Image (cartoon, rainbow, N blue to C red):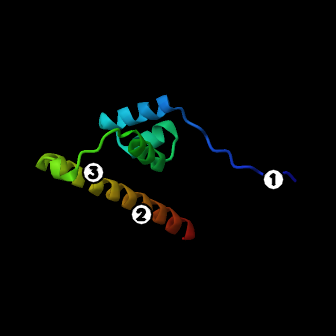
């Protein structure tokens, strides 16, 4: 029996930038993950990688701070939703 080697798919930087551009246009990581069959966590990693400059927190406007706060809340809500959906699927199988 041959040892199975897990193959990780490699994505080009152009593809990653395309995904980040779609994200910046308002598409959600969950939508992009399903649409392009990629892990949602990769989208967040790519977003952090391709952010070229970060503005110091003290230089942010009130609106920018609010956007960052809302993005964090949205990310947490998406993760909570994903966990709940998995739990629901598991509990449905047990019955």
Disc 2 element: helix
Earlier residue among tags 1 and 2: 1
Disc 1 element: loop
Earlier residue among tags 3 and 1: 1
In the depicted view, which residue is nearer to us: 28 or 92? 28
Residue 9 image-quadrant placement: top right
Q: Which residue is mark 1?
A: 3
In the depicted view, which residue is nearer to us: 54 or 32? 54
CB under 8 Å between callouts 3 and 1? no
Q: Position of residue 43 (x, y in %)?
A: 44, 44
Q: Which residue is mark 2?
A: 84
CB under 8 Å between callouts 2 and 3? no
How far apart are labels 2 and 3 at the CA level?
A: 20 Å
How far apart are labels 3 and 1 at the CA level?
A: 42 Å
For the point 39% across and 58% down, the residue is 79
Disc 3 element: helix
How far apart are labels 1 and 2 at the CA level?
A: 35 Å
* Residue found at the very far bottom of the displayed protein: 95
Q: Position of residue 94 (x, y in %)?
A: 56, 70
Crowd class of label 2 (few under 14; some 14 to 19; many from 20; radius 10 Å): few
Residue 26 to residue 74: above or below: above
Q: Would residue 66 be seen by someone viewing this image from the given angle? A: no
Earlier residue among tags 2 and 3: 3
Q: Would residue 81 be seen by someone viewing this image from the given angle? A: yes
For the point 46% across and 43% down, the residue is 33
Residue 73 image-quadrant placement: bottom left
Crowd class of label 3 (few under 14; some 14 to 19; many from 20; radius 10 Å): few
For the point 35% across and 40% down, the residue is 51
Q: Which residue is mark 3?
A: 71
Residue 27 to residue 89: above or below: above
Q: Position of residue 25 (x, y in %)?
A: 30, 33
Depth check, mark 2 against mark 3: the one in front is 3
């Amino acid at each position: 029996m041959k040892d199975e080697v897990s193959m990780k798919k490699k994505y080009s930087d152009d593809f990653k930038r395309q995904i980040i551009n779609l994200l910046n246009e308002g598409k959600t990581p969950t939508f992009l993950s399903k649409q392009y069959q990629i892990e949602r966590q990769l989208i967040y990693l790519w977003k952090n990688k391709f952010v070229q400059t970060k503005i110091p927190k003290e230089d942010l406007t009130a609106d920018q701070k609010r956007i960052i706060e809302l993005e964090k809340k949205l990310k947490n809500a998406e993760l909570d939703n994903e966990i709940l959906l998995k739990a629901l699927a598991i509990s449905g199988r047990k019955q």
